[in-house]
RNA sequence: UCCUCCUUAGCUCAGUUGGUUAGAGCACCUGACUGUUAAUCAGGGUGUCCUAGGUUCAAGUCCUAGAGGAGGAGCCA
């Protein structure tokens, strides 16, 4: 008996006449009186292999139990196809049904389903072309990111997922406890007494691995984290998740310009990797996007997916300061005509999504990196500029996605960092270890956070972040 | 959390200024067809019109509340 072969391998094989075993799930079955055709997919590729069955009295019964979704094991002969849709196909000698899928109950049909419907069927949606393609692209991007950093001398660091620090300032945190929630111990002041909790203190899920990555960078020079991240914000948008994956490189002896170079080089590398390794899936996702947007007006349609990816590779990202961005926005048509919901009055205002989109999609028409933001609207750890007003932050903005990367050069001066922490009410006692790195052999360093799912949104052309992670966690949604 | 929109067959959706028996395509079943490409052609059954109230001679359609979903905003990756 031949060993089972991946459909991906078989479709590229030229060993015609070979006896093969194929296992997978039925996508469609069709046929006439004498012959049936089964499109079978095993997820190794977006392409299905065609199984041809001569109908006879022996297999008639089995065939009637084969519907979309059924799992089959087929042995037969790999032959050149006489049909026009494929080069090779399998002439079945024997078909075994491994698992039936009752068509009255199985929700996936060989037709277009809405993404919302499939979100409610997240346990089955891997079996669709779209979600199979996304899963494969997602894997390729994970691999490409590790490869990029490995090939460039970075070390991967596992930042902790449980944290005792609640001062990272990146957002609301999920609390973790083994206390009995029906009977919460209180101290004399009436506050929760964590002394009997698992860690003897309040614990949370991490909102960022950055601070820990900094510690590692100040010894290993070039490090990155790639781990799950949790934000308990009540965010209900197509680009936020309560649980997402973040890549956070941190590099000693880097300034903000080195940081921007790294961000741009890395993004271009992983996008090129997708083009080199995922073309079948990208072509499908491109067609899917065209189909989805065919009823939109021409000016509302997005650029064709593969063209868009190449476009990002071929151009330098625009780099401007916050001050320059404000000046462009202040003199822009929508601002003068008061078309922005938030009209830019002057320096110091935070940039809203509409402003970022104007800069990226209308004004520059390419990815934009904005630097040197007012210190009031950025985190305590960012390197302060000599002007006393701005910090060396950098945000990378992509079309449609908005902010895909947020980063900065870090404040390495102990006194400046300490003063800023006091100003922003960051409790010193929970951050002593962070401050100590500025006391012992401090050096300039920089890093950034890349939202992995936002990258996948961009590469796949999908519109909702809940569709690029297998099991999305969002407010009021913890199914599967 | 705020604003707007949506919820009709297993799925995708139509349903006019409120009007009598609620519609189509797909899926499914039956039949036809010598190899199809989401096969095609013919025939067949399919409904808590999201839920609870209300207005009306009459509600899928109008009003109120609730539930679920989507889009946008804020927070950000």
Image: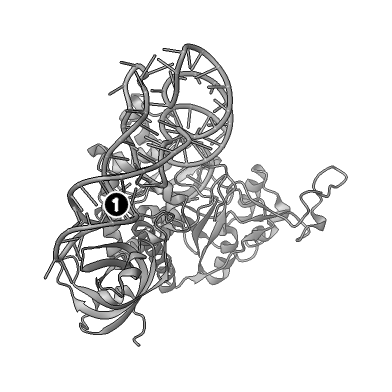
> On screen, A330 above or below A461?
above
Q: Residues within 10 Å of mark 1 (few under 14, many from 20)?
A: some
From where the camera sits, is residue A403 visible?
no
Question: Closest to the observer: A153 or A237?
Answer: A237
Where does residue A277 sit, x and y in percent of width and height? 31, 68
Where does residue A197 sit, x and y in percent of width and height? 78, 57
Q: Residue A356: which quarter of the image?
A: top left
Q: Quadrant of the N terminus of chain A?
A: bottom left
Residue A261 horizontal side relative to residue B38, left or right: right
> On screen, A340 above or below A140?
above
Question: Closest to the observer: A247 or A82?
Answer: A82
Where does residue A138 sit, x and y in percent of width and height? 40, 62
Residue A432 horizontal side relative to residue A319, left or right: right
Q: Quadrant of the C terminus of chain A?
A: bottom right
> On screen, A398 above or below A56?
above
Image point (65%, 42%), residue name: A423
Question: Closest to the observer: B5 or A440?
Answer: B5
* Residue that protrudes farthest toward the bottom in the picture: A1
Which residue is identified by label 1? A288
Q: Residue A310: which quarter of the image?
A: bottom left
């Amino acid at each position: 008996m031949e060993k089972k072969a991946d459909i991906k391998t078989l479709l590229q094989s030229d060993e015609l006449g070979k006896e093969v075993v194929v296992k997978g799930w039925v996508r469609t079955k069709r046929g006439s009186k004498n012959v049936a055709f089964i499109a079978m997919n095993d997820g190794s590729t977006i392409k299905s292999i065609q199984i041809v069955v001569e109908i006879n009295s022996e297999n008639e019964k089995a065939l009637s139990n084969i519907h979309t979704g059924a799992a089959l094991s087929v042995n037969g002969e790999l032959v050149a196809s006489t049909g026009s849709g494929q080069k090779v196909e399998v002439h079945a000698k024997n078909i075994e049904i491994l698992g039936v899928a009752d068509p009255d109950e199985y929700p996936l049909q060989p037709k277009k389903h809405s993404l919302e419907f499939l979100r409610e069927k997240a346990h089955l949606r891997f079996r669709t072309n779209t979600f199979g393609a996304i899963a494969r692209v997602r894997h390729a991007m994970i691999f490409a990111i590790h490869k990029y950093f490995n090939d460039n001398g970075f070390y991967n660091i596992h930042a902790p997922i449980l944290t005792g620090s609640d001062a990272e300032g990146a957002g609301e945190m999920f609390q973790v406890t083994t206390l009995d929630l029906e009977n919460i111990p209180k101290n004399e002041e009436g506050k929760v007494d964590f002394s009997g909790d698992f860690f003897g203190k309040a614990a949370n899920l991490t909102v960022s691995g950055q601070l820990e990555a900094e510690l590692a960078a100040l010894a290993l020079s070039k490090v990155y984290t790639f781990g799950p991240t949790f934000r308990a914000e009540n965010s209900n948008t197509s680009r936020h998740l309560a649980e997402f994956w973040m890549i956070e490189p941190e590099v000693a002896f880097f300034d903000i310009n080195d940081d921007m170079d790294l961000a741009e080089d890395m993004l271009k590398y992983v996008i090129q990797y997708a083009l080199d390794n995922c073309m079948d899936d990208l072509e499908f996702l491109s067609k899917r996007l065209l189909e989805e947007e065919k009823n939109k007006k021409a000016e509302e349609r997005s650029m064709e997916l593969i063209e868009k990816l190449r476009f990002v590779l071929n151009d330098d990202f625009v780099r401007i300061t916050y001050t320059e961005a404000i000046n462009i926005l202040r003199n822009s048509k929508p601002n003068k005509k008061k078309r922005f919901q938030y009209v830019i009055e002057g320096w110091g205002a935070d940039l809203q999504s509409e402003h970022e989109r104007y800069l990226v999609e209308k004004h520059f028409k390419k990815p934009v990196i904005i630097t040197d933001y007012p210190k009031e609207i950025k985190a305590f750890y960012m390197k302060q500029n000599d002007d006393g007003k701005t910090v060396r932050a950098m945000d990378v903005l992509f079309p449609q996605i908005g902010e895909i990367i947020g980063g900065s050069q870090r404040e390495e001066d102990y006194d400046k960092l300490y003063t800023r922490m006091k100003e922003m009410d960051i409790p010193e006692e929970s951050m002593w270890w962070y401050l100590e790195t500025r006391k012992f052999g401090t050096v300039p360093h920089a890093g950034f956070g890349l939202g992995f799912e936002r990258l996948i949104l961009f590469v796949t052309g999908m519109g909702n972040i809940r569709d690029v992670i297998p099991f999305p966690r969002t407010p009021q949604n913890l199914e599967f």
